[in-house]
Amino acid sequence: MTDVLDTRVLKLNSQYAPLDTVSVREALVDLCAGIVEAIFINEAGAFQSLNFTSWRQLSEYKVTNEADWINTPRYRFPVPRIVRCVDYSKVPIFEPRLTPLGIMERDNYTCQYCGHKFKSKDLNIDHVIPRSRGGKRSWTNLVCSCFVCNNDKKQDRTPAEAGMKLIRKPIKPVRSTSFLLPRGAKVYHGWDNFVSLVYWSQNLSED
């Protein structure tokens, strides 16, 4: 069983942009030192930044029993699952990770065959050269596609065979400011206010 001190906390910069996930142990050390503040999200979805003393006092009244708790000889308080740096405001630049979300952001949520823009739930990721033909899972062979173009028109064919053309050539992005959770990371309450979650953050692993 994982020690609660080794579970993860989402770390934000002072402008509420995600930086990383850190261990509860590291987050608590920084919280006690005043380097970070804990983020409390109320029932209306509003954020409140709290120092260690305020977090401990507020949690006695407003944090549900669903939280993981830390017990010390003097106090009992819940684990903060989101912390915010007090002074650090820089936004890190991340190397692009090949994910469905990354493909959709690169293609501006636009089907690369019909040119229409869609919501993410109405899109999928197409191999330009099908895997059955040796096509690789890579930035230059994956594109955003609507279900009609991919499933009904292109199917398991090349664009030329299907009589279709890409509206632009797929390329690998240089870099991104979008933070994605590590694959398989456990997600805690409130994280979805700051990061993209679940399927669209999963690494596709280049061939």
Image (cartoon, grey):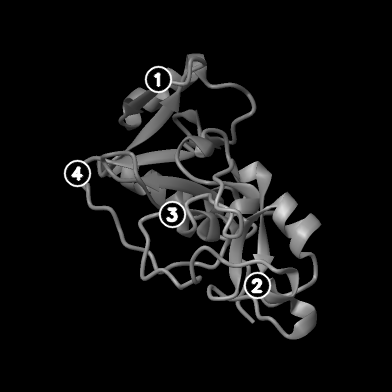
What is the secondary structure assignment of the residue under circle 1? helix
**Mark 4 vs mark 2, CA separation in Å:** 45 Å
Residue under circle 2?
128
Tell me the distance, in whole angstroms, between the alpha carbons under discs 4 and 3.
Answer: 20 Å
Quadrant for the N terminus, please.
Answer: bottom right
| Disc 4 to disc 3: CB gap under 8 Å | no
Give amino acid for label 2: Val
Q: CA distance from mark 1 to mark 4?
A: 23 Å
Mark 4 neighbour density, 10 Å: few (under 14) some (14–19) many (20 or more): few
Does 129 sit above or below residue 71?
below
Question: Which residue is the extreme one toward the bottom?
Answer: 134
Q: Nearer the viewer, residue 23 or 109?
A: 109
Q: What residue is drawn where x is 40% and y is 20%?
A: 57
Reading the image, the residue beneath label 3 is 179
Q: Amino acid at mark 4?
A: Asp
For the residues bearing labels 3 and 1, Cβ distance under 8 angstroms: no
Sequence-wise, the earlier of marks 4 and 3 is: 4
Does residue 71 show up? no
Residue corresponding to mark 1:
57
Residue pointed to by mark 4: 87
Q: How far apart in space, not on screen, are marks 1 and 2 (Cα)?
A: 56 Å
Q: Which residue does the image show at 51% across and 59% down from the upper left?
A: 102
Residue 114 image position (x, y, % from top left): 60, 54
Position above or below: 201 against 172: above
Measuring 59% from the left and 31% from the top, which residue is drawn there? Answer: 67
Tell me the CA gap for discs 2 and 3. Answer: 27 Å
Q: Is residue 144 left or right of residue 18?
A: right
Q: Secondary structure at mark 2?
A: loop
